[in-house]
Image (tube, rainbow, N blue to C red):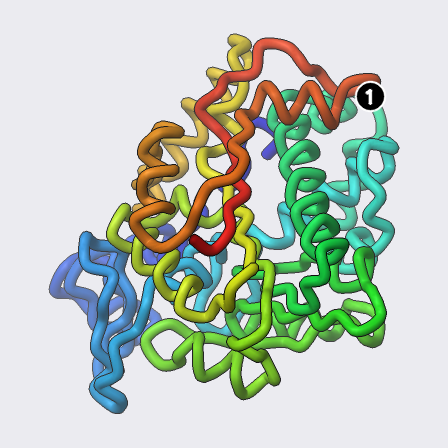
Amino acid sequence: MAHYEYARAHPLWETAKNGCSAGQRCDRGHACRSRLDHRPSQARPRHTLGDDAVTQDPVSPRRTSALGAAVVCHSFGMRRSTPSSTAQNVALVRSHLTWLGVLDDRFAEGMLRPRWALLEKGMRWGPARRMGRNRTFAWLAARTHFFDDAVTSALAAGVRQVVVMAAGYDSRAWRLAHAGVRFYEVDHPATQRDKRRRAPAGGPAYVPVEFGRDSLEDALRLAGFRPDEPSVFTIEGVTMYLTEPQVRDLLETVRRLSAPASRLAVNYGLGVEAAATRTSRVGALLARVQFAMSGERITYRPAVAQAEALLRDTGWCPQETRTAPDLVREYVAGTTLPTTDIRPSAFAVNAVVS
């Protein structure tokens, strides 16, 4: 897994793995129109990642935004009732980077499920040590620091609401806690149920959102979120799995929830694309094969100018854009992780309400 960040990162991975074919009923009792439409025969339509970011729920005809797609796409190998494995992968990386002294996330290890905890321990010894010291891990370390700084900068400026989109096993609600600051974590209910069993007491307000059924705006308000007060939103590790219309819809939704002086931190591009070495190129190729097998597509790879233009179009004013080489040099220099031969195709942006 060290050479790719989110291989098999799609909730429909189980469908491809089980090999259901069009027009057949699989051994799990599902009527499948294709390998990538794995749904109960009487259930309402499931989410698919097409060019349209809007689906209709027959029970509730409310228009649903790309937030749901973001939450679902964050869940690698995840069925509707199971927690996200992608989020566990990220927690594993952060736990290992903490062991290396590159990050300070003492909560990550405690949130690992047994298999991931065993994998992380195995990366500390023998030949497996190299797995945790590559350029993908360097990018993920730098990315974590970037989002940490985006949140702490907002808090220093007086912002008192933090919304973590597709939060997974994120620990900022504990690590960056401040008196009077409320953290809101938006994610799939199954992942949040598992996280609450493993996370320390206190922490965020959990905001479960299931695509095709729940409204982000309604769910946040119900959790106590105040749209009339400044907030900082983080969208980490999400945009690459959406189409451009879905990214636009997500940014517009977040903008509607943002009072003046609100902030946004968002990243683009995969860690596997941040490395220029031959080993990492092979890893990226393997990751693309895995994605093809799972039915997942990396659908959004904007250039910096394109990403900034879309932010402006959706009511955000980009303040700072940092490419992967810049971030890795700033945050990872002096550690045991590599800082050279990093591709600039991955980058992150800080923006404010325009």
- Residue 257, placed above or below residue 97: below
Q: Residue at x 64, y 46 (%)?
A: 90
- Residue 4, placed above or below residue 184: above
The one nearer the camera, 235 or 139, is: 235
User: Does 113 sit left or right of 239 as displayed?
Assistant: right
Q: Amino acid at mark 1?
A: Thr
Q: Position of residue 320 (x, y in %)?
A: 54, 35
Q: Position of residue 289 (x, y in %)?
A: 37, 31
Q: Residue at x 69, y 26 (%)?
A: 131
Based on the displayed image, in which of its 4 quarters is residue 37 positioned? bottom left
The one nearer the camera, 43 or 352, is: 352
- Residue 113 visible somewhere in the drawing: no
Residue farthest bottom in this picture? 59
Q: Position of residue 348 (x, y in %)?
A: 53, 36
Tell me the element at label 1: loop
Kindly identify which residue carries mark 1: 335
Question: How crowded is the residue under tag 1: few (<14 C-alpha within 10 Å), some, or many (20+)?
Answer: few
